[in-house]
Image: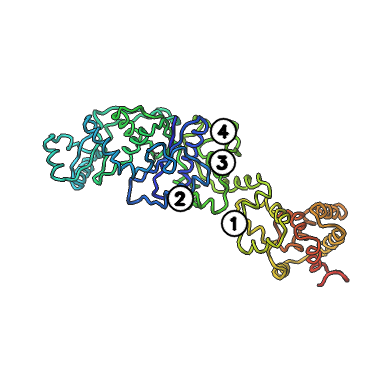
Amino acid sequence: MKVRFAPSPTGNLHIGSVRTALFNWVYAQKYGAGLVLRIEDTDISRSKSEYEDNIMEGLNWLGLTMDESPLTPLEDCLYRQSQRMDQDIYLQKAKSLIDSGYAYYSFETEEELEQERASAKARGEAYVYSGKSRLLSPEQIRSNLDSGMPYTIRFYIGEPQSIVVNDLIRGDIDFDTSLLSDFIIIKSDGSPSYNFAVVVDDYDMGITHVIRGEDHISNTPRQILVYKALGAVTPKFAHLPIILGKDKSKLSKRDGAVAVTDYRDQGYLPDALLNYLSLLGWSPEDGRELLSRDELISQFDISRISKSGAVFDEKKLKWMNGQYIRQHSPEQLLDLVKPFLSSVSVSAISSFSTTLQVQMIQSIQDNLELLSEVNHYLELYVISEEKFKERLAEFSFSEQDQRVLLLFASKLSSSNCSRDDVESAMQAICDEEGLGKGKVFKPIRIATTSYSSGPYLPDALSVFGLDRVLKRLSLTIQVDGYGQS
Ligand code: GLU
């Protein structure tokens, strides 16, 4: 068995393509099938090498490794359609179809074709190419070619018939060929059309299962005809449901950063992204949402892929990323956030020991949904005492708050200000004063950090250390002989 991912490098690797790559990858892992990356760059005006680089970079980051690709070819096989075109692979195949009567040269000019279209429109009929060139005599064809007349090569559809696509997801889909034109397989510039190149390549590369987006369903009957004409066995097809934006329209840039490298740069983790994308149009039997790669592979079942469109929900993706962030140890997370730290954060946190840095990260781990949010949540560790005072001045404290702060300062002063010390001091105040947690935690949080929300307070205060905590408390506590205000 062999599957393939065949992107066109006419844009960056986007979410929809990644979902296709992922399903092919999972299928290959599950069934031990080969996985081919083929670059479909026959549209020279729109294909760019930087897009190919972006596709490779994205796949690499996601860990979707391909068995065969332009960088890891099998023997001397070529995996870029432009290179295959330079070797005349498509033209030779097209000529062999001319010899066997399945294709023919077509010499109509664009104006003539336009006239055909216009008269079909005037008759209120769907346009189907007249097939005029197929009636030319061999002599006429020879003389047209000899005189350098521009031509295309068209595939001969033949007598009207019904083509059944046996789709692994959608079941049998019937297509009536009388609605199809004899389609172009080699364009006037010598390049192959998508419907032809894809079949030549899938056949040459031994592809047994074509798993791709639903937008290609209508191309499939044409491709099946080409397989038959080439005397090749038709692969099995599986068309994945379309990915929709929030408003159920086609996924667009408005629905979020569409290039996968943008997701990387925002601080998404590859496993979270793949997990989320695997649930776009598929779900495991037990309905679980958080699945590791191995679980995904073991639970994957193509017959559980749905036919209806799947809505891409960036909020849910973000939530899932947060879940993956929490699966790492604080030490691992410290490494993961390093590339996202601003220079201000770097210089501020580098004054702390590694142990305290790890503790800082641990304190914000539950807050993070994106790695890039690290600077925001680290801010309370980073601000200067000056800035702290400025921020603090914006809050006011009730008498009860003052009492809580005083009790807290006295309980803490004889401790090491460890996480446990802070926890038990705060708990003791709740118990002794008969106050709810909020009434105790909130004034302490504001008086020690100048933020009304943030990381788990016992973690944060143990990073600050006793001196800093007491000094900061003294700025707020207004009791004779204590504090400064
Ligand atoms: N190059 C096509 C695309 O990016 C691939 C279609 C296919 O998988 O057959 O849509």
Query: For the residue labelled by badge 1, is the local secondary structure a helix, a strand or a loop?
Result: helix
Horizontal arrangement in the rendering, residue 360 relative to residue 62 (left or right): right
Q: CA distance from mark 1 to mark 2?
A: 20 Å
Q: Quadrant of the N terminus?
A: top left
Can residue 102 be spotted in the picture?
A: yes
Horizontal arrangement in the rendering, residue 330 relative to residue 15 (left or right): right
Q: Where residue 275 is drawn, which disc sits there?
A: 3
Query: For the residue labelled by badge 2, is the local secondary structure a helix, a strand or a loop?
Result: helix
Viewer-nearest residue: 125 or 419: 419
* Residue under pointer 4: 284
Name the spot of residue 435 as percent of width and height, x first: 83, 54
Q: CA distance from mark 2 to mark 3?
A: 21 Å
Query: For the residue labelled by badge 4, is the local secondary structure a helix, a strand or a loop?
Result: loop
Q: Considering only order in the chain, which callout, 3 or 4, is on the residue closer to the N terminus?
A: 3
Say if disc 1 is inside 8 Å of ligand 1.
Answer: no
**Disc 2 marks which amino acid?**
Asn
Mark 1 touching mark 2, by CB under 8 A? no
**Disc 1 marks which amino acid?**
Phe
**Disc 3 marks which amino acid?**
Asn
Q: Where residue 340 is drawn, which disc sits there?
A: 1
Say if disc 3 is inside 8 Å of ligand 1.
Answer: no
* Residue under pointer 2: 54
Q: Quadrant of residue 386?
A: bottom right
